[in-house]
Amino acid sequence: MRAYRRLRVRVNKSDREKLRGVLHGGLQPVRTVLRALTLLHLHRGKSAAEVADIVHLTPKAVREIGRRYQDAGLQQALYDKPRPGAAALLDGSQRQRIIAMVCSDPPEGCARWTVRLVAEEAVKRRLVPRVGRESVRVLLLSHDLKPWREKNVVRGRTQ
């Protein structure tokens, strides 16, 4: 078993007030509340193991929260850094071109558009370099289009 030296966290008065504001300030993410409680208990001189039992975190997580407070301050200890997320696969003009294609008649020999057919035709017509079925499905869903149901697609009148 590894012996850890005792983590001594001293939270200054303004940060303690902010922590109390987080705890008494309405709806907060659970992670933020647990981290605030952790910092307050560490400030009171409790060990990482004792705090871990109280707030139901691992001792390692408690030590990490305390170290983040000491190294980077309250914001870094309470909140996660923003995550970038995945880049959008289709830009606005590509999305519009696919939607316009779906609102037109399906290719010769097909009774209606399917998600697979939309993906294949978008690449074949060079609207996009490549696109997957799932991207097409999400795009159609976001525009509330269901081209496999003929009644739900707006088409130009042929007279």
Image: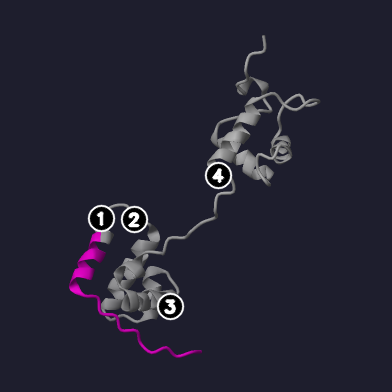
> Which tag, 4 or 1, sits closer to the chain's start?
1
> Which tag, 4 or 3, sits closer to the chain's start?
3
> On screen, 33 above or below 113?
below
Q: Amino acid type of disc 3?
A: Pro
Quadrant in the picture for residue 30: bottom left
Q: CA distance from mark 3 to mark 2?
A: 23 Å
Q: Amino acid type of disc 1?
A: Gly
- Secondary element under disc 1, as helix, strand or loop, is loop
Could you tell me how many numbered marks the image carries? 4
Within 10 angstroms of label 2, few (less than 14), some, or many (20 or more) residues?
Answer: few
The residue closer to the viewer here, 101 or 64, is: 101
Label 4: which residue?
91
Please name which of the two marks, 4 or 1, marks the residue nearer to the observer: 4
Please name which of the two marks, 3 or 1, marks the residue nearer to the observer: 1
> On screen, 158 above or below 37?
above
Q: Are marks 4 and 3 in contact (CB under 8 Å)?
A: no
- Secondary element under disc 3, as helix, strand or loop, is helix
The residue closer to the viewer here, 113 or 80, is: 113
What's the magenta region? 1-21
> Which tag, 3 or 1, sits closer to the chain's start?
1
Label 2: which residue?
28
**Badge number at residue 140:** none
Q: Residue furthest top?
A: 159
Label 1: which residue?
25
